[in-house]
Amino acid sequence: MGLFDRVNRLIRANLNAAVSSAEDPEKILDQAIIDMQEDLVQMRQAVAGAIASQKRTQQQYDKSQSEANTWYQRAQLAIQKGDENLAREALSRRKSLADAAGSLKAQLDQQLTNVDQLKRNLIALEGKISEAKTKKDMLKARASAAKANEKLQSTMNSMGTSGAMAAFERMEDKVMQMEARSQAAYELGSNDLENQFAALESGSDVDDELAAMKAQLTGAAPSQGQLPAGTTGAAAPQDQAVDAELEALKTQLDQL
């Protein structure tokens, strides 16, 4: 591929891209309808011209037919009068007019076909224009909606990258962190409270067990300062013997 071809293709590609980007659907649709309306006007003019031409051909054909009949009648009259030369001249005129009428008839038939086709094309074009107008309104509405949506999305995208939106996002993260710390503190406080109650419950069990053990030990071996259950305060026999021995020792010491 030559350099010129590559440059030419590049230029055409850039032009096509520029034209495509500059095209406004609403304006293009309006212009398309205008172009179709102009085609419709030209089509109507063509149909009108064809019909006028057909009528002129029809008139010429009818005139040729009428004149041919007239010269035929004149030839008959000349024969009746015995003038064969005049009758021959009349028949010659009649043949020329009949040939002309035959040519006009062929032309007239072709014109009738053309006019009929033009009329059908005109009706079809009118239907297409009516359909195009309806479709144009629908497409323009869709184009307007698409533009509005595109503008909205552009606005939303610009908001997503703006400082205000970023600040909102930071504050949202900060609030979430504060909520997490609050939840953690609540959970820790709940655990401490449960631990304290658990300690109280555990300590109560130990105290009860200790009190029971003290009661058992006190009942088995009472201390010296505490009277055993069922005594009235009298000295035990062992204590009386000790006291008597002590008194005897004191008496001996006095006698010395």
Image (cartoon, rainbow, N blue to C red):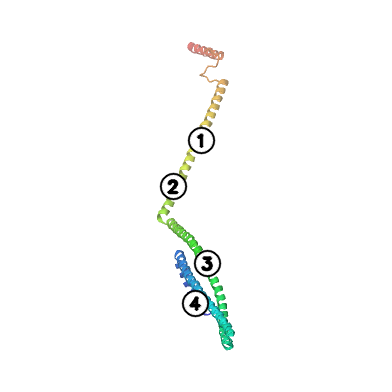
Residues at marks 3 and 1 touching, judged by CB atoms closer than 8 Å: no
> What amino acid is found at the position of numbered circle 3 in the picture?
Ile
Tag of residue 194? 1
Q: Nearer the viewer, mark 1 or mark 4?
A: 4
**Secondary structure at numbered mark 2:** helix
- State which tag comes first along the sequence, 3 or 1: 3
Q: Residue at x 49, y 61 (%)?
A: 134
Q: Indicate the amino acid at tag 1.
A: Glu
Residue 65 at x, y = what percent?
55, 78
Give the farthest residue toward the front: 81
Nearer-N-terminus badge (4/2): 4
Where residue 52 sits in the image (x, y, percent)?
A: 49, 74
Discs 1/2, front: 2
Q: Which sits earlier in the primary sequence, circle 1 or circle 2?
A: 2
Task: Give the residue pinned by disc 4.
Answer: 8
The residue sitting at the left extreme is: 164
According to the picture, the residue beneath numbered tag 2 turns out to be 175
Q: Which amino acid does label 4 sit on?
A: Asn
Looking at the picture, does residue 105 appear above or below residue 133? below
Q: Is mark 1 on a helix, strand or loop?
A: helix
Counting other residues with Cα less than 10 Å from the Cα at mark 3, is it few (<14), some (14-19), or many (20 or more)?
some
Judge whether 182 appears above or below 226 on screen.
below
The residue indicated by pointer 3 is 123
Q: Position of residue 235 (x, y in %)?
A: 53, 13
Rounded to the nearest angstrom, the CA distance separating label 1 from label 4 is: 85 Å
Q: Nearer the viewer, residue 31 or 97?
A: 97
